Amino acid sequence: MKVCEQSQRHSISTRKDWSVHKLSHAFGLIGSGTTPASSEESFYGGEVPWLNTGDLTDGEVIEIPKTVTEEAVQRFSALKVYPAESLVIALYGATIGKLGILNRPASVNQACCVLAEPRTLDSKFTFYWLWSSRQQIIELAKGGGQPNISQETVRQLRVEAPPLPTQKAIANFLDRKTAAIDALIEKKEKLLALLAEKRSALINQAVTKGLNPNVPMKDSGIPWIGEIPEHWVRKRLKYYFGFEKGRNAQELTATYIAENPGAYPVYSGQTENEGVMGRIHSFAYDLKEAIFTTTVGAKVMTSRVVRGQFSLSQNCLVMIPRVIIDVPFVNYQLETIFRHERAGIPSHMQPSLRVDDLRKYDLLVPPESEQRAISKYLREAEEKRVQIVRAISEQVIALKEYRQSLITAAVTGQLEIPAEDYEATPTEDRPS
């Protein structure tokens, strides 16, 4: 392969020297792992890293929190220790298709497939090829139930690739380019996280201190809140709201909703789609304003204002005003209360919110006109924030799409690779 004199790029667009490699032939070792009995303490906490699919992040695997002992490795023949630079793919579950390259020797669990001892394919080139083909590989795994990529599916995959020196150059090129893209994505995602933190701080300040920094203050009696405006009152949430779980929640399953489509939303414990599980032809509630919240799971205590005609499925409830009060203001204050409550739940516990819990919560309540002013202030701030978040999120999506298209183009021979990426390969691997 010749270097173009003008551009100093290696053209791979002709693909005349590309050939097809079956993964089972291209790697000397393709295997998996296992999970030692969790009841046996002597199998865990040793010196051998034990990778789970949740540790895969489509890059170099740096963090492997769990470890096993040499005793476990000796006891379980399926618990192999794979060398550094082995390629790992998640076979099933929430992380199906996720990839990683080991930065040190490690064992894996049974949900991983490991490709080691490369022969005719460069591991990093194969990593990028699998990345570009991820969706097609997952499609191959779809059956009657949960998608499951078998080891045999991986073994049978056929990769069209150039000679090894060009594979390594393509990998070098993509390492450079994706690192730059990933740095931009990380910067923008940090900005999104900062905007979320600022939103929380703004809400907390407004619903516990008010908008006027010059009013006299008093102790709220709640240690984590501290002082509140002197003219605010502290009263139980149950004085202002009644609490109801779904009147026919057990009946409103996904199957029922699919068989009875209509215009009225059914809210559930899910947090996607603004909590709407689906829409049916009838409703259980018709309310001017109320507060909906989830009650179980990782997204417990996710609240929002709901209006109009709707029903409730499981793992959620609705708070219905008993007196005149600004419902959006209360929802903002509940966000602050719920955030504090979630932070205090141990990680090993299943988070939940009971009606009895809500009855014990206190609200800090200003006069009604001040409630409306605070909720208006926060709503306008949120509208501005959402516009900024939307713009940044769209940029992140565009960067990820560009990264994907760049990887696909490079591993399928549609790009010219700069000479510098060939020069980064070991001397013996460079093309003559």
Image (cartoon, rainbow, N blue to C red):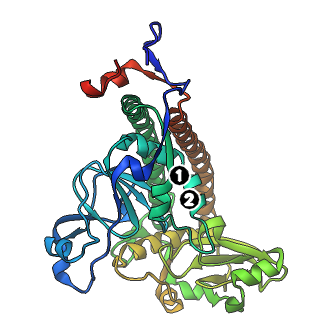
Q: Position of residue 166 (x, y in %)?
A: 40, 29
The reply to whether discs 2 and 1 touch (Cβ–Cβ < 8 Å) is yes
Quadrant the C terminus occupies: top left
The local secondary structure at tag 2 comes to helix
Q: Position of residue 107 (x, y in %)?
A: 26, 64
Task: Answer whether residue 10 is visible to the viewer in this image.
Answer: yes
Q: Split into 4 quadrants, where in the image is the N terminus?
A: top left
Q: Is residue 323 above or below residue 328?
A: below
Asked if 412 appears above or below 99 in the picture, the reply is: above
Mark 2: give few (<14), some (14-19) or many (20+) Cα within 10 Å: some
Q: Nearer the viewer, residue 227 or 184?
A: 184
Residue placed furthest toward the front: 25
Near-viewer residue (178 or 249): 178
Q: Quadrant of residue 431?
A: top left
Could one spot residue 310 in this view of the protein? no
State the residue at coordinates (50%, 38%). Answer: 407
Residue indicated by mark 1: 134
What residue would you read off at disc 2?
A: 138
User: In the shown orientation, is residue 71 left or right of residue 360?
Assistant: left
Query: What kind of element bears circle 1?
Result: helix
User: Which residue is painted at 77% across and 86% down in the image?
Assistant: 284
Residue type (three-letter) at the residue carrying disc 1: Arg
| Mark 1 surroundings: few (<14), some (14-19) or many (≥20) residues within 10 A | some
Query: Is residue 40 placed above or below 408 in the rendered structure?
Result: below
Q: How many marks?
A: 2
Alpha-carbon span between mark 2 and mark 1: 6 Å
Residue 414 is situated, as x and y percent measured from the top left of the image, at 56, 29
Answer above or below: position of 221 versus 164: below
Relative to 5, 273 lies left or right: right
Q: Nearer the viewer, residue 212 or 121?
A: 121
* Circle 2: residue type: Ile
As rendered, which of 41 and 252 lies closer to the eye?
41
